[in-house]
Amino acid sequence: MSIINPYNDAFFMKKALREAEAAYEKGEIPIGAVIVINNQIIARAHNLTETLNDVTAHAEMQAITAAANYLGGKYLIDCTLYVTIEPCQMCAGALFWSQISKVVYGARDEHRGCINLNTKLHPKTELMGGIMAEEASQLLKRFFIEKRNLN
C-alpha cells in the first residue's frame, strides 16, 4: 500500500492563495506567500504596502523576515517559498541573499517579474512556476478591475 503525500506544491500554493485573499480583503494587491521547511509552514505573509505605507512590504519580503526570525538566522537553506505571483526584482534580490533553496510561483509577471528583468537568484536556488497560475492571475485581475471601477 502506498501512502499519498498531501504536502505537494499545490497544497502549499493554496495556503499562499489564502494569504493573497487576505491581502485582497484589506485592499492590498493580492499577493500571498508561505515559506516551508520539511513540509512545515514557518512563515505566512501577504502584501502590506498600503497598510504599512512601505513600498518594500511585499509578501515575499514579509515572509523572508518571518522565516529568518523563526529559524534564528538569515539564511533560508532547505526552505521553499511559495508565492502567488512571480517575484519582482527587489524580492528576487532579497531571495538571492537569503540563499533560499527553492522558489515556486503561481502566475508570471510579464512586466515587473524577475524573469523578464533578468534578475538572478542564488545559483543554488531552484525556480519553478505555473502552480495554480490561473487562480493567482484571476485574483489579481479581479482586484485591478474593481480598483479601476472605483476610481
Image (cartoon, grey):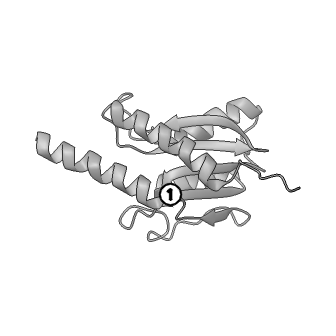
User: At 40% from the left edge and 35% from the top edge, which residue is drawn?
Assistant: 23
Give the amino acid type for the residue marked by disc 1 in the picture.
Answer: Met
Q: Is residue 130 positioned above or below 53 on the image?
A: below
Q: Residue at x 69, y 30 (%)?
A: 69
In x, y percent, where is residue 35? 65, 43
Q: Residue at coordinates 20% horizontally, 50% vertically from top-left? A: 145
- Which of these two is toward me, 50 or 104? 104
* The quadrant where residue 25 appears: top left
Element type where label 1 sits in the image: loop
What residue is disc 1 on? Answer: 132
Q: Is residue 26 visible in this depiction of the protein?
A: yes
Residue at the extreme front of the image, as rendered: 1
Horizontal relation, residue 105 to residue 96: left or right: left
Question: Residue 47 location in percent, x, y?
Answer: 43, 38
Percent position of residue 18, x then y? 49, 38
Q: Residue at x 60, y 53 (%)?
A: 10
Quadrant of the drawing holding the N terminus: bottom right
Q: Is residue 3 above or below residue 21?
A: below
Numbered label tally:
1
> Can residue 48 be seen by looking at this rendering?
no
Q: Quadrant of the C terminus?
A: top left
> Is residue 58 rendered to the left or right of residue 139?
right
- Specify the quadrant of the image occupied by residue 44: top right
Q: Is residue 22 left or right of residue 72?
A: left
- For disc 1, the neighbor class at 10 Å (few under 14, some 14 to 19, many from 20) is some
Q: Please state the horizontal and vertical placement of residue 85, each as a whole percent of the image.
A: 46, 55
